[in-house]
Amino acid sequence: MLESLVNALVALWDHPGVQAVAGILGLILAIATVIGVSWQLLKRSTKAPPSDGQPIPTAASELEQAQLIQRNRFILQSICLDYYATPFGRQLISPLKPMEGLREADPIPLLVDPNWLPAVPIPFKQIKLHWSPDTPPSTHLDSALDHRLEFELKKRKSQNRPVYRLNSASAGAGGLELTFSHDTYVSYVNTCEAMLWSTAVATVRFLISRGYTKFVPDREYEILRASANTIMTNDPYRTKVVPNLFTNRCASVGVNALTIIRRQGSFPIFLMHRRGEVNREASSTYHVIPAGTFQPILWNDREHATEFDIDFTLLREFAEECYNDKADEEGHLDDSIAEIRKKNRRLDATLQLHAQGAIKTFFMGLSIDPVTLKPEVLALCLADLTTLKASIGEFQEQYEGVRVQEPFDRQRIADLLERAQQERLLSAAMGCLALAHKHFDFITSELEGLPQ
């Protein structure tokens, strides 16, 4: 039967009328192909030419030069990590090393001591905080640079508030112990943010010395990474500061928490923050919520026993970034903490929920940003959406940027880390996400255990 069918098809093909139709169809197909290719070529020829980059301000001030690179922070992260991987750089950071990413070839741009990362997230009460009031103040790197950075601070209307400055971090049989003293926000800017500006200026000068007149981040990325050691050799400050010797700068600590929300009848979400230009630090980046500086609200730290608590800072920032309760507004600075809680109902409710165990916070690790050499606490904040709505209310619009809800699953975390450069993810955000991916089962269990 099959043989008969084949013979019939062959006979049909031999018919002159069928061959004529097939020839016409083939001609039509060829014409369509030519038209399609021509259209694609026409579209390409009329496309706008690719951007040829930003002019490099060869005669501008150092501050303007630095801003060109500072806006491309991912380049600075890579340059600094590559520098600390050189023999001299490894000596500077030993025993620190880049934080492991999801893949060995893609480390997280943070420096860590393995002893600073607990096997599983732990409550903050297990971290021992010590106070050292007699620590001498930090030494500023350069008075001229101080002047330029302080001018930038005034433009951003930043206040020279007190901060808790980290002096040492040690891990023994009893766990992690951190020792602090007082310092000021301007001291932090002049000794840590100054590292960012200094390396950015050295990077611009390297490009100028190689004859570049325009800066195209994607084009220059690999060139700059390969030249990290040369760039750093011309950075007047980087080689003076040992990253894990905290007393050589005002090591003001950043507190960064990945907030994960359980939702009844649906998948959990985690919160992220597209930071706006109003942010004092790391503007126009993608970061976790909440994130803030470990510092007292009250200028003279007169309620030290309450405020010298990383949990308190984390929860205060949570109330501000989710509910716009700004406990540190200027009018509140002379109040007591009790008065501030009365004026900020949502902050008070947040602190109460935490005391009741309805908001859980965990320490995931301590790290150092390789660009600013700022210590960064990596943390978790877990809550139930129904409980938050009943006790505090709906989330408010973010005045410092835009709050984003992401699905809490391993693949989404991996995708974000894969696109870290395009998303402009901050190093500390990447660290929180990588550790959340590592501790995914622990987090899922803790979410299930939250009160209904």
Image (cartoon, rainbow, N blue to C red):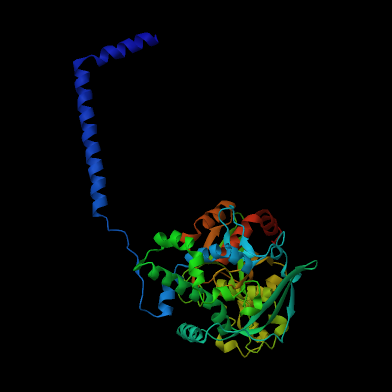
Quarter of the N terminus within the rendering: top left
Residue 83 lies in quadrant: bottom right
> Residue 94 location, x and y as percent?
66, 66
Which residue is found at the position 51% from the left and 77% from the top? 236
Seen at 51% across and 63% down, the residue is: 78
Q: Quadrant of residue 37?
A: top left
Q: Position of residue 64 (x, y in %)?
A: 40, 77
- Please give the count of numbered marks on the rendered protein: 0
Name the quarter where the C terminus is drawn. Answer: bottom right
Compared with residue 102, is residue 256 higher up or lower down, i.e. above or below?
below
- Across and down, in percent, residue 337 comes to 67, 84
Compare residues 434 and 227 and report the one nearer the observer. 227
Where does the image place residue 121, in percent across and percent down from the top left?
70, 62
- Above or below for 165 versus 92: below
The answer, for residue 230, to whether it is visible in the render is: yes
Q: Is residue 355 visible?
A: no
Q: Nearer the viewer, residue 269 or 171?
A: 171
Position of 211 compared to 300: left or right?
left
The quadrant holding residue 9 is top left
Return the residue nearer the eye: 289 or 175: 175
